[in-house]
Image: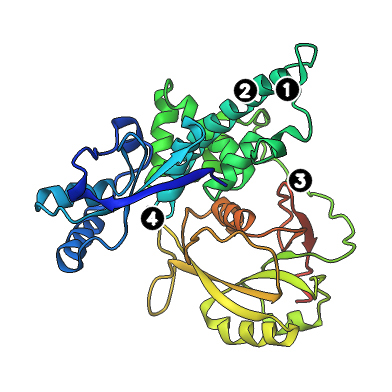
Amino acid sequence: MFSYAITTSARYGEDKRITSQPAEYETLLPPLLDEDLKNLEESILKDGVLHSLIINPDKVVLDGHHRLIICKRHSINEVPFVEHSFNTDLEEMEFVISFNLNRRHLIMTQKVELGITFHKIETENARRRQIEAGKLFGENHPKEEVPPKLEEALGEEPGEAIEIAAKKVGLGKNTFRKGKRIAEAAQTDKRIYAAWRDIADGNRSIDSVYQEFFHQEKPPTSSRRPSRSIVPIPKIEGVFQVIVIDLSNRNLEKLKKSNIPFDATNCVLWLWTPFKSLCDAFKLLTHWGFKVQTMLTWAKNKKGSGKWLLNQTEYCILATIGKPSVNLTYQSTMLIATPGKHHSKPDEFYSLVESLCHGRKLNISSSTMQRPGWELMEVNTNAV
């Protein structure tokens, strides 16, 4: 939460000192798309400025930069604004990013880059907390340790900087950590920079680039094809609040016979299903007592096979039971990602689930690929 105060409310025509965002603020977020700018201009010319500009005590615009430019271009002086003040410069910078974040159509690389900025802010906050700890507890208090209650006393958001930054941009912790390393290495390595551009263009995933450049396991020296390692599947006990079922090529009606360990009081279920099995999928969810909320469409960057039209999409139904804990930050029903190996679902999908859902997570799949933070339940595909 930000500690700001609304100190005034007026109109631009009454105060000509209001200035646009400084360059360092403009570069924090990707620019608006041309179509969005056009729509904004048409809306202002038709209905006026519907949302107030937000400025700081120095009369610098924190939100409404494009609205101000359009108004100046058309000599519109009746522009409402409110003034906010912040405790620190970092709070103001974080406000600028967070307040505008959900208004942009961000690709994966842009999310990582914004996450890096958030991480720098959180790191600096930690440094300042250490300084504050010295002031509050005396010189004998070790500077590298922050008292457990100090973050709460200072109104700071607790948690590891990486995890906080990842959450703010809607990425999983592991995905952001990998993306951060790739982005930083791309500044000095031309090959990694080219791979980073491939991620931006949707031709590669963060996970595949990370595996290529940073995976520490050496490739097998034998010319023979290595045997596929089998990950032991532990016994599943208890119930889960987040479940992904990836058995797209199976008859979903037969899943009714399977014992799915979902939490009957609070659970989010993601059910992957081909288009031709959608009716069976909806019946299955009703049978289990789930309520369908929406459907995710995975748009791939290459076409597959098909009788009428070439398949380039897959579908995942999002259903809930009870009142699960979720972190809604304007996630989209469209997932644009590159297909992975062995017909597995993309890393971006699991990052989406991790950013949205809270609780114990279970991946039900015919694959034995293990993901950090998830438990795996293998289903006998011959029986299903």
Q: Earlier in the sequence, mark 3 or mark 2?
A: 2
Q: Are marks 3 and 2 in contact (CB under 8 Å)?
A: no
Q: Amino acid at mark 3?
A: Ser
Q: Residue at x 54, y 51 (%)?
A: 170
Q: Is residue 204 visible?
A: no
Which residue in the protein does label 4 denote?
103
Q: Which disc is residue 127 wearing? A: 2
> How far, Cα to Cα, is label 2 from label 1?
14 Å
- Front residue of this view, candidates 294 and 5: 5
Indicate which label's residue lies in the foreground, 3 or 4: 4
Q: What is the residue that sits farthest to the top in this orientation?
A: 139
Q: Secondary structure at mark 1?
A: helix
Task: Provide residue 88's location: percent of width, then percent of height.
Answer: 50, 31
Q: Earlier in the sequence, mark 3 or mark 4?
A: 4
Indicate which label's residue lies in the foreground, 4 or 2: 2
The way the protein has been coloured in the rendering is rainbow
- Front residue of this view, candidates 64 and 253: 64
The C terminus appears in which quarter of the rendering?
bottom right
Q: Secondary structure at mark 3?
A: loop
Q: Are marks 2 and 1 in contact (CB under 8 Å)?
A: no
Q: Amino acid at mark 1?
A: Leu
Q: Secondary structure at mark 4?
A: loop
Q: Earlier in the sequence, mark 4 or mark 1?
A: 4
Which residue in the protein does label 3 denote?
229
> How far, Cα to Cα, is label 3 from label 2?
44 Å
Whether residue 215 is situated above or below residue 106 in the rendered picture: above
Q: Amino acid at mark 4?
A: Arg
